[in-house]
Image: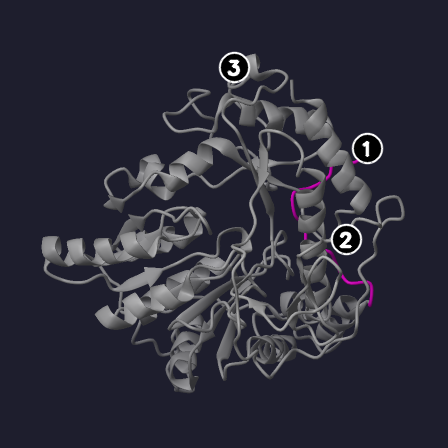
Amino acid sequence: MSKMIHLCLAKMSETGMEQKYIQEAFDTQWVAPLGPNVNAFEKDLEQFVCEGKRVVALSNGTAAVHLALIACGVGPGDEVIVQSFTFCASSHPVTYLGATPVFVDSEPETWNIDPDLLEEAIKDRIAKTGKKPKAIVPVALYGMPYDLDRIMDIANRYEIPVIEDAAEGFGSRYKGQVLGTAGRYGVLSFNGNKMITTSGGGALICKDKTDWDKIMWLATQARESYPYYQHETIGYNYRMSNICAGIGRGQMTVLNAHIAHHHHVQALYEQLLADVPGITVHTQPDTLCHFEQASCHFEQPTCHVERSRDISEISPCASLSRDDKGNMVSRNDMGNSRDDKPIYDSNYWLTTITLDPSLKVKGQENAYKQIITSAVGGAAGVIHTASTAVTDCQPNDNVEAMRLALLAAGIESRPLWKPMHKQPVYRHSPAYVNGVSEGLFKVGMCLPTGPCVTDEQVAYIVNAIKDNIL
């Protein structure tokens, strides 16, 4: 392979719609953080998520978390419960507001927030501080849905608003409901590596027009209704640009095709790695039930996912796919639809694997011998060089050896997110842990899964994994 196989990169559509909307923005001179593309993109998103929700398009997903916290009344001295197993954007905005994140560990099935620990944390914080947390932030880790029924039941009993961080889970569903639509607010991200991209960008799903009005106002510098600029509240310059929204409009036409491709790639990994000792592919819980699928769906052209000839016979047995309307159906080994539907319907944003600690990998003895001074993903690369090559919480040597071996083969992979409760910056934050996320961080890694990843590349990646196991 002469080119690097990237972890996950949202692919531009082949319809040319992105270029059309961008050109319209230039032709009409709407090159600003507002405009017709922004309005239309928001309507496309509202049509996709259904449920009568309103959507505000923003500059990024972190801004969406920040605004949702403000709208929930989070301020200095408050506490917010945040899933520990996540990217820092889920928790950093809590600190922007002078509040304290309270981290809750994961359950082993979904790797997402453990409902039992969640309730334990709420009770303990009330006992210790005399007040309940101001919000709960569950995260759809790598696209996997969280146990929405139990989370919402707990949140409703204690009357705590839920901010669903579905930044990695755009298009994922729980019992047919799009993630981000059950809580008070839902966070989306359209970064370059997400299911669809606007190059950079995000959105906040609001439950009604009242909340939408407040978020829109805060996102546009909280300007009052005067003919001049009057500000009585601190606002933020968080609106999405008309250019980026044009990209998003075009990307929405291929969203379902992207989700279908991620499912296909996940199924290939599952089959090709099924018989590799010491390697386990993480998949959604195999639980089915009867429920009513949402009646609305986002209308878009039918898109065909290209499959390579040499391994086209590999079909995702007992896996998930979408019908011609974009609705999820479950299929048995013969490819027949069943009436039962999956409770957990992941978009499989990234395929993740775990390596048994006893597994031996080529070059394992050299893991963590040098301080990293080059990019490990992301355009910025390494800005602040570390003082040591190791920390007190890091992936096992065989995981790091596999990452380096794949990199040498032109394959980008990464460790799982390091739990926030193990991050030095949060060493003083309360945490309710069970060892699940820390244990997974030590043994797990992410594999290339994006729309640009072909069947041949999946086979190449799997062969590279096999070739480096001793």
Q: Position of residue 355 (x, y in %)?
A: 55, 31
Q: Which mark is residue 369?
A: 3
Of the image marks 1 and 3, the number of the one nearer the N terminus: 1
Compared across the picture, whether 131 is left or right of 50 comes to left
Measure how far apart labels 1 and 2 are at the Cα level. 24 Å
Front-lying residue, 32 or 307: 307
Number of the label disc, if any, that sits on residue 1: 1
Span highlighted in magenta in the image: 1-15
Q: Are marks 1 and 3 in contact (CB under 8 Å)?
A: no
Secondary structure, mark 1, is: loop
Magenta stretch encompasses residue 242: no
Q: Is residue 381 visible?
A: yes
Amino acid type, callout 2: Ser
Near mark 2 (Cα within 10 A), the count class, few <14, some 14-19 or many ≥20, is: some
Q: Give the image location of residue 419, x and y in percent.
A: 39, 41
The quadrant of the rendering that contains the N terminus is: top right
